[in-house]
Amino acid sequence: MYPYLFDPIKINSVEIKNRIAYPSLGLLFSYDRKLNDRYYHFFEARARGGSGLITVGPVGIDYIGSGLATIALDSDDYVPDFKHLTEIIQAEGAKAWVQLFHAGAYSHPILIDGKHPIGPSEVYSPYSKTTPKAMTIEDIQIVQNCYVNAALRAQAAGFDGIEILASAGYLITQFLSPIKNKREDDYGGNLENRLRFPLEVIQKVRKALGSDYPLTIRMAGNDFVQGSNTDNETPEIAKAYERAGIDAINVTGGWHESRVPQLPMTLPRSAYAYLAFNIKQSVSVPVMASNRIADPQTAEKIIKDGMADMVNLGRVLIADPDWPKKAFEGRADEIRPCVACSQGCTDQIFSGLPVGCIGNPQAGFEQDRKIVPIKTSKKIMVIGAGPAGLEASITAATRGFKVDLYDKENEIGGQLWIAGAPPHKQELISYIPYYKAMLKKYPISLHLNTTVDLKLIKKNKPAHIIVAEGAEPLLPPIKGLDESTVLTAWDVLKDNPFLGKQVAVIGGGAVGLETALYIATKGAITPEMLYFLFSYQAEPDDRLRELLFKGTTEVTVFEMLSKVGKDVGKSTKWILLDHLKKFHVTIITCAKVTEINNQKLFFEKNNEVLQQKFDHIVVASGSKSIQTLSSQISETKIPFQCIGDCVKPGKIGDAIHGGYLAAMRI
Ligand SMILES: Cc1cc2nc3c(=O)[nH]c(=O)nc-3n(C[C@H](O)[C@H](O)[C@H](O)COP(=O)(O)O)c2cc1C
């Protein structure tokens, strides 16, 4: 399967067995700059899964540019651990790469013992919220030497190749950017001068490593930052890199401070492959594409269509390290999807916590959460085929249990259907075909349209029961919720009922905001319509913009707290709020809804009682556990566990991880 994806490729002198690369991804598995077992097991799994190239990184070249939470190669003391890691990766048939990292002005003072970050110029960084110290010529030389020394250590540690990080807004990007680099010496000014720092780094590293050692670079295909480099300049930059001795170019999107999203579900699959192609047209060395290359068909198409020579699978390989193997063996339906939710990875990092994956309970826990097979097969019952019950079922079946899985609905998935309904959330639905494939693969009997009661349990006599009954909408104590024009967010997301022009949403948490967006987009033109109208220039651009962001409803969100989106992840909140703004959703905070009367919504704000009339009012004030069975199950005297929302409403990741752990505890 996928002959283009699995065709070997050479970078300088090194042959890579396929076109799949795992890119550098900060994991935060240690806070002492050192590798540890958690890293070893994590990378071993990714290499074993069949990727051709595994990049370890980011790896700091000095303390001020990386800090305590980044593994580092600024001392010979670290080399033996890296040697151990390269051997682990290479033993699985993958090539080991390392990404050398300097954050420059993006260094956060907390992570560098309060030291002052450095950068090309004293330009405030909205990412680290500091103004760096402008580097002197001596600083420049010191940092360049740190690159060289770290590269030599990486070579000594047995890495097959080295990547210099020159993307995402870090030090090299800062030198390249006219908005960050305000220097008036040879390192600032026109592009030729702004390129001087990175080119000197490349030349010095190349000289130290020798001509046949692979040296690659990761660059932004477009900074996506006002006033900075765009895809007009980046081909020139790439050409200069190639001339300076770079063997392959890894092209990604913009910076951390870009207001164009880089990672979430909003970003269509392979949306930034065009940036790789833009570079590929101007260089002769291999080029890699990045960002949201989620499935084998998309990856194959990028290579086959000549957009890039290799693909980076980042979060995708966190979600399923065996993606390459499964794709190669024609088992793509068994790939555990990366839904680009950012909750288990990016949001973790932003909270200073280790990376994991909401959909893969083993990610980051490769050693501790190994599947333990059972000696004698036993029968278990799992009640509820939402994410918790599904994960529990497949984990138990993988261990050797014979599983009977029940759901009262006519379809598996539970709340995934609701969670995946709002705009830009559809990736969540991709868990469903995955679980369907796994239910088929293992000895799991699925019983849909079946309400389980004690009688059925006693008749089946399972050795163990897992109850995952789920949750239902929680209705707040507001008078008038029984009016026919009042609905729950779940009703709206599940059934897409008719709604009038004026709609209120009570509750500004994640579900309330996503439901508001869902309602606000009704009637707006679809991407296909936009394509059609745009390609024929049927409407002027301004009018298209209006049609894209104007639906048939006017939505107002009422939130009691002073801010909305309290339970939305850090990395995606701004995107959701931005969408709501684009669709002109009105948000009223510090507003306590007290009553609904004849479609009038009464609310208290600033000690005043105000009212507004709506055609429909949608309640999104959380959910509560269903405990019909869990409250009686102990009567059966059969060992049982209750998991997921029926214990406490949580996020999808809580449900999936809870299901996995419950099945491991049996
Ligand atoms: C938690 C996290 C940490 C990352 N750290 C780095 C990094 O240190 N260096 C880098 O070049 N890219 C980094 N990236 C970007 C990834 O390498 C990759 O380009 C990005 O996740 C998009 O690809 P994907 O959609 O396949 O995940 C990081 C991404 C995430 C989610």
Image (cartoon, helix red, strand yellow):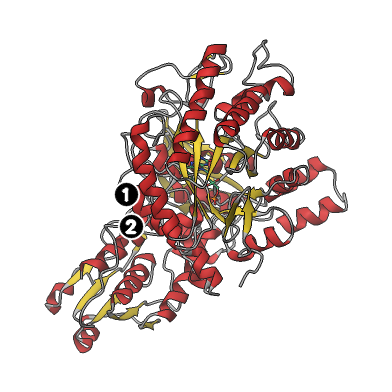
Taking the view exactly as shown, the residue that stands out farthest to the bottom is 459
Judge by depth and name the residue closer to the eye, 662 or 550: 662
In the picture shown, does residue 350 fall above or below 613? above
Q: Is residue 268 left or right of residue 415?
A: right
Q: Which one is earlier in the sequence, the residue at label 2 or at label 1? A: 1
* Residue 161 found in image quarter: top right
- Give the quadrant of the N terminus: bottom right
Q: Is residue 357 visible?
A: no
Q: Residue placed at 54% from the left, 59% from the top?
A: 427
> Disc 2 marks which residue?
366
Q: Helix, strand or loop at disc 2?
A: loop
| Amino acid at dot 1 | Arg
- Residue 566, percent from left and from top: 41, 40
Please tell me in which quadrant of the rendered image residue 577 appears.
top right
Q: Is residue 204 above or below residue 614?
A: above
User: Residue 235 has which mark?
Assistant: none
Element class at badge 1: helix
Question: Is the C-beta separation of discs 2 and 1 under 8 Å?
Answer: yes
**261 vs 615, nearest the viewer:** 261
Residue identifier under label 1: 38
Seen in the picture, residue 567 relative to 384 is either above or below; the reply is: above
Q: Which residue occupies the foreground of this view, 513 or 443?
A: 443
User: Does the image show residue 166?
Assistant: yes
From the top left corner, tell me how far across and down residue 289 is, in percent. 64, 50
Instruction: For label 1, count other residues whose C-alpha is less than 10 Å away and answer few (under 14), some (14-19) or many (20+).
Output: some
The amino acid at mark 2 is Glu
Which percent across, then down, holds residue 367? 29, 57
User: Would you say 482 lies left or right of 8 here?
Assistant: left
Disc 2 within 8 angstroms of ligand 1 (CB) = no
Q: Are there few (<14), some (14-19), or many (20+) residues within 10 Å of tag 2? A: some
